[in-house]
Amino acid sequence: METRYDSTTGLPTELSSNLTGVGQYVIGQDYTRYGEPTLTTRQTDSDLYVQDDTYYDSVTRRVTRTKVKPETATGTVNDTSYSYDAAGNITSIADTPQVGVADTQCFRYDELRRMRVWAKWRAKRGGL
């Protein structure tokens, strides 16, 4: 494995391997001004690629959404949104891909921030 770094920021931009059929793995990486990964493009010697995006809350810097889009899919195979309470606990995770089945999970916590309730819903065609 070999990692290449941006000469200005020092952040990783590429990851390659000498394994047969792999070659370069991460061919592009973008970051926020805080050094958080935003857009990652992965591609192996097969020339097929997948891109994933990560979005952050502008105040808390918590991840608010992630998306995954392979070259071979007609849309996103993962489009996950995250909700948090004031203490930073995740209260819901909702995956609404363009390709595949939507899924929402909700969480509740007690006064010691221990997870106490978990619920899962599957979306029907056309929505929840």
Image (spheres, rainbow, N blue to C red):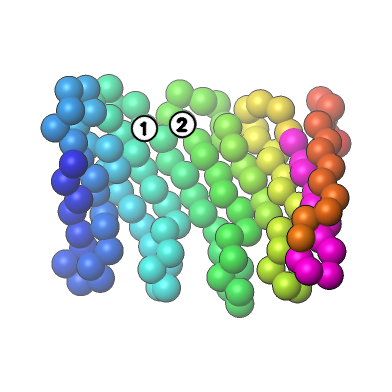
Q: Amino acid at mark 1?
A: Tyr
- 104 inside magenta stretch: yes
Position of 104 relative to 70 (above/below): below
Residue 75 in the image: x percent, y percent? Answer: 57, 32
Position of 118 relative to 43 (above/below): below
Q: Secondary structure at mark 2?
A: strand
Residue drawn at x 81%, y 38% is: 120
Q: Amino acid at mark 2?
A: Pro
Give the magenta-colored segment's residue range. 103-113
Along the line of sight, the residue nearer the viewer: 31 or 117:
117
Q: Secondary structure at mark 1?
A: strand
Position of 84 relative to 104 (above/below): below
* Distance between mark 2 and mark 1 Cα atoms: 6 Å
Left-right relation of 55 to 85: left
Left-right relation of 38 to 76: left
Q: Mark 1: few, some, or many residues within 10 Å (few <14, many ≥20)?
A: some
Position of 87 relative to 26 (above/below): below
Residue drawn at x 19%, y 32% is: 23
Left-right relation of 71 to 100: left
**Sooner in the amino-acid sequence: mark 2 or mark 1:** 1
The image quarter containing residue 103 is top right
Q: Quadrant of the N terminus?
A: top left
Q: Is residue 84 in view?
A: no
Residue drawn at x 42%, y 58% is: 37
Residue bearing mark 2: 70
- 34 inside magenta stretch: no
